[in-house]
Image (cartoon, rainbow, N blue to C red):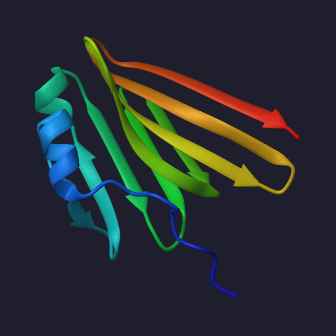
Amino acid sequence: MPREPFLLTPEPRDFAEALGVEPVEVEGEAQELDLTEVVGEPLRFSFHVVERSIRLRWGRVDLYREGATRLRIVESPGRTGLYVDFETGPMTGTLRIEVFPEVTVDDVLLLS
């Protein structure tokens, strides 16, 4: 039985407006944001809507996760980031990737 796609995925133009790049199709239906030139260090984020998976490659970090339910762009004064919500069985959480003003990653998983 196929899983549900992301409940919410920004439009390509939303990525361009907030982050300066649009996602490009890679490996079948996966979309990738190459933010390397935007942030000045290796940073790639990809997502697959149907498989509900994401992959973050940042320097030596290579994180792959399934069970994504929502991908959103979060902007506040002086900050812009990508937030991915997850739900797999009894686990829920959010992966927060701050892109501006500097790259930081915060990953929270909780047992519900």
Residue depicted at x 19% and y 35%: 18
In front of the other: 60 or 25 = 25
Q: Quadrant of the N terminus?
A: bottom right
- Left/right placement of residue 14 relative to residue 96 reads left
Quadrant of res 77: top left
Residue 75, percent from left and from top: 32, 26
- Left/right placement of residue 36 relative to residue 31 reads left
Q: How many marks?
A: 0
Residue 49, percent from left and from top: 44, 67
In front of the other: 81 or 103 = 81
Residue depicted at x 25% and y 47%: 33
Quadrant of res 99: top left
In front of the other: 89 or 32 = 89
Please determine whether, in this image, residue 39 is positioned above or below residue 74: above
Q: Quadrant of the C terminus?
A: top right
Residue depicted at x 55% and y 34%: 95
Residue depicted at x 25% and y 11%: 78
Please determine whether, in this image, residue 73 is positioned above or below residue 80: below
Direction bottom: furthest residue: 1
Residue 107, percent from left and from top: 60, 28
Direction front: furthest residue: 77
Residue 32, percent from left and from top: 28, 54
- Left/right placement of residue 63 relative to residue 82 reads right
In front of the other: 14 or 21 = 14
